[in-house]
Image (tube, rainbow, N blue to C red):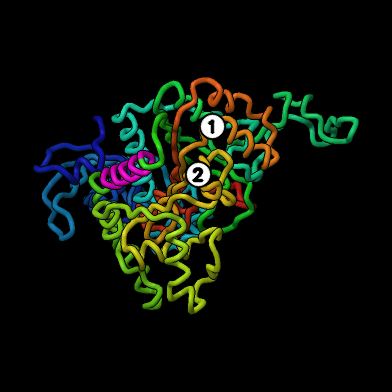
Amino acid sequence: MKHTKVKDLLNSTNTIDEVSVKGWVRTFRNNQFIALNDGSVIHNIQCVVDFENTPEETLKRITTGAAVALKGSLVESQGKGQTYEIKVSHIEILGDSDPEKFPMQPKKHSLEFLRENAHLRTRTNLFGAIMRVRSVLSFAIHQYFQEKGFVYVNTPIITGSDAEGAGEMFKVTALPFDNTPRTEEGKVDYKEDFFGKETNLTVSGQLEAETYAMSLGQVYTFGPTFRAENSNTSRHLAEFWMVEPEVAFNDLDANMDLAEDFIQYVIKYAMERCEDDLKFLDERLAAEEKQKPQNERSEMGLLEKLQFVLENNFKRVSYTEAIDILKNSKPNKNKKFNYIIEEWGADLQSEHERYLVEKHFKSPVILFDYPAKIKAFYMRLNDDNKTVRAMDILFPGIGEIVGGSQREERLDVLQQKIADLGIDEEELWWYMDTRRFGTAVHSGFGLGFERLVLFVTGMSNIRDVIPFPRTPQNAEF
């Protein structure tokens, strides 16, 4: 008999004479009530066992974590808390779980403990909810771009270019470490390596996506990216996923329109399809906030925050205007910021971004026209020769969630910028060709997927929104 998902049974509108269900035991009370979950929904279904007619040996094996197959009838529940329950007629233990050793006991575990058991943490309500929301957001991203006629492009994971110019990359090599071939100057001879040149794991698919946008019109990438940045913080991962659309003939204004529409679409999609999970996450966050001192509590709950992004137009503010606001703000004048804003040209920190969103404008903010010195080489230089056509989208509670720009389409300007930074033009010959043959205004942005999941789930540590986090000194699982 084919088994039915718990979600479908809980959504049933009538009783059913014969059902089959499979899942994992969350709790087993009084030798009678099994709380069963199969991952399809945050709620468990109550399954009532006729313990007087069930062998003692079987009852002993119904433990937290055990996988079971149950048959019976879906009946109206006698107790509170659920409309329907299963009156069990047959029990099969599919996989035992030693209650003395199973880590995910029915009690509150710390997030740190759950990270150490990342392979089992989705057996909890919290991580089941997070990963279902993550899955829905992922689908929404593809659906949005597919509906708009974008072409999905898989850009290389192994690359010879450093899109960000950051230099914090993981090297990829097949050379032996104990007998590395060297040149006459004593440097590593990469000509002897697998690809015949120095290669790394990608930090961004943007440069390759740009080349496709300049023939296919509008494209997007959605894949893993890597940063060998030794940042052991709640906001950084060494391996994370990036969404990067690139659009030919879009200027910065059109780029901002696209980013705002895209973010509001995927958040609305998740809110419509993950109602139960988000309600649970909202209640969890409210309980967490109550533990904090009053002055550290968020002014908005999770669902409020998501609604805030949907209902407010994103305020567009130039970097120059933002610096003036921050310089004259109370926390800056009273030296309450950790990083005091003293002059134009400062790189904004999360505390500044959050002040603009949460205190000053009380809406999501798009900052644009940043100083060229603090931005990447591929961003279009403005006529003032000081600023570039860059934009960042700032959200409550999180700060920057999107970074993008109009790309520098003029060959001579791009060549000069590359030369000033000491980047070898030969390495980017293929990228420069898009400026040699049919160049045009084009723009794009990058959204760190985990930052989005962090915002939508209300979690505070990025390690809790990716299945198996990769961080400094940690590559477990």
Residue 369 has which mark?
none
Q: Amino acid at mark 1?
A: Arg
Helix, strand or loop for disc 1: loop
Magenta region, residue range? 254-270
Would you say 204 lies left or right of 295 here? right
Q: Is residue 122 magenta?
A: no
Would you say 23 lies left or right of 330 here? left
Tag 1 residue: 410
**Can the viewer see residue 35?**
no
Q: Is residue 260 magenta?
A: yes
Residue 383 has which mark?
2
Percent x, y for residue 413?
58, 35
Q: Nearer the viewer, residue 32 or 366?
A: 366
**Can the viewer see residue 474?**
yes
Q: Earlier in the sequence, mark 1 or mark 2?
A: 2
Q: Amino acid at mark 2?
A: Asp
| Magenta span: chief secondary structure | helix
| Residue at 26%, 46% in the rendered image | 268
Where is residue 318, by image quadrant? bottom left
Q: Nearer the viewer, residue 182 or 386?
A: 386
Where is residue 364, by image quadrant? bottom left
Percent x, y for residue 476?
59, 47
Q: Residues within 10 Å of mark 2 (few under 14, many from 20)?
A: few
Percent x, y for residue 475?
60, 46
Q: Residue furthest left?
A: 14
Q: Nearer the viewer, mark 1 or mark 2?
A: 2
